[in-house]
Image (cartoon, helix red, strand yellow):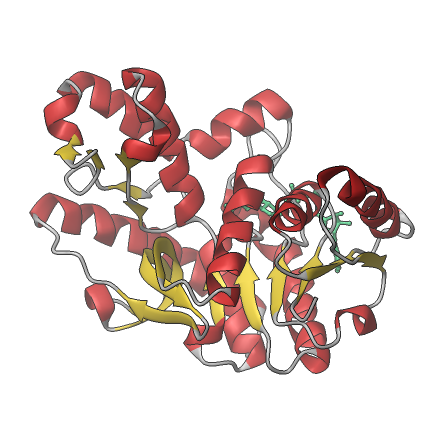
Amino acid sequence: MTNKISIVGAGMTGASTAFWLAEREIADLVLVDIVEGMPQGKALDLVQAMPVVNKDVEIIGANAYEATAGSNIIIITAGLPRKPGMSREDLLTANAEIVGKAATETLKHSPDAFFVVLTNPLDTMAYLTMKRTGLPRNRVVGQAGILDSARMRAFVAMETGVSVENINCYVLGGHGDEMVPLTRHSNIAGIPLRDYIPADRLETIVNRTRKGGGEIVNLLGTSAYYAPAAACAQMAEAILKDKKLIIPASAYMQGEYGLNDMYFGVPVMLGANGMEKIIEYDLDESEKTAFEKSAAAVKETQEALKSLVKF
Ligand code: TXD
């Protein structure tokens, strides 16, 4: 295949991202991890699944970054996941070092690559990737919004029994418990959610969405992986296929929504040029207040990063 995607971190989300991408047959894949043998073993297992699903995809595992040379897209999932009782922000110190290195090392071998970042704390790790690589903002985007919106869509489907295909939800803001599920913009087949679901039930869905990551951490003892990985695969596909797909993702803000010099979850258009455009929704007063609260939480983590790392 002519396209190549490298995934740094072959743990739960990394390997699951490879799985979803292999099924799509859109690029050859490289899994990189520091654990010896593990990325090679997972890659070989996936290679052996390809004849069953009739897909021609080259998949290799490696412990060194040379194998990633010439990638179109680098997906960074390396780093520690949450354990019960931890916030995403608790991961900052450990993951800043891992992500910073992954970003600079992969860029050396793939100078034209687009970066999709997954590691937590997400908005701050995307910021770190952009600062460390010195890339323009269209080439570094963070995954959070597809997942958070998909969680809300899943909860709405569970509540109403309507197909997920008819359910459109938009969760913006930082990837933390202050994220902003936009009930006014979300709908079922064009019908505003607020007209379809009683207010108290909708409130329950909004709260469950905000804590959706923690719910899974408490059940599993570690972070979710199937859904986050499916979201990464969708973003990579949108870039490779130049789809002009509008999805919520973490992007570098330059005045949009009144925010500057930070990564934040907003609707973006993904295409061959990466993060091609930020779409600005019209927000009412209560939505603006929720945005500001979420932005303040992200800023705080970002400031903590700045005291740890010199750019
Ligand atoms: O929506 C989102 N943004 C997220 C983010 C949803 C789910 C998980 N999210 C975060 O992704 C999570 O909080 C973590 O920070 C990362 C990765 O989660 P995952 O569940 O995949 O963690 P694992 O299974 O522990 O895998 C991480 C791998 C593991 O195999 C380590 O050996 C590897 O990262 N690792 C490294 N690989 C390469 N290079 C370096 N330096 C390295 N350090 C660790």
Q: Is residue 17 above or below residue 204?
A: below
Judge from the rendering whether residue 248 lies leftward or rightward of residue 90; answer left or right: left
Q: Is residue 223 above or below residue 9?
A: above
Dividing the picture into quadrants, the one containing residue 169 is top left
**Outermost residue, front side:** 54
Judge from the rendering whether residue 182 lies leftward or rightward of residue 130; answer left or right: left
Q: Is residue 230 visible?
A: yes
In the rendering, at what x and y percent does residue 204 appear?
Answer: 27, 21
Q: Is residue 9 above or below residue 74?
A: above
In the rendering, at what x and y percent does residue 133 appear?
Answer: 58, 78
In the rendering, at what x and y percent does residue 139 appear?
Answer: 49, 74
Quarter of the figure with the C terminus: bottom right
Residue found 66% across the figure and 54% down from its top: 94
Judge from the rendering whether residue 136 lies leftward or rightward of residue 182; answer left or right: right
Residue found 58% across the figure and 21% down from its top: 219
Q: Nearer the viewer, residue 52 or 70?
A: 52
Q: Nearer the viewer, residue 119 or 305?
A: 119
In the rendering, at what x and y percent does residue 49 appear?
Answer: 79, 40
Q: Is residue 261 visible?
A: no
Residue found 10% across the figure and 26% down from its top: 195
Dividing the picture into quadrants, the one containing residue 256 is bottom left
Residue found 51% across the figure and 76% down from its top: 131
Quarter of the figure with the N terminus: bottom right
How many tags in the picture?
A: 0
Q: Nearer the viewer, residue 223 or 61?
A: 61
Dividing the picture into quadrants, the one containing residue 310 is bottom right
**Outermost residue, right side:** 37
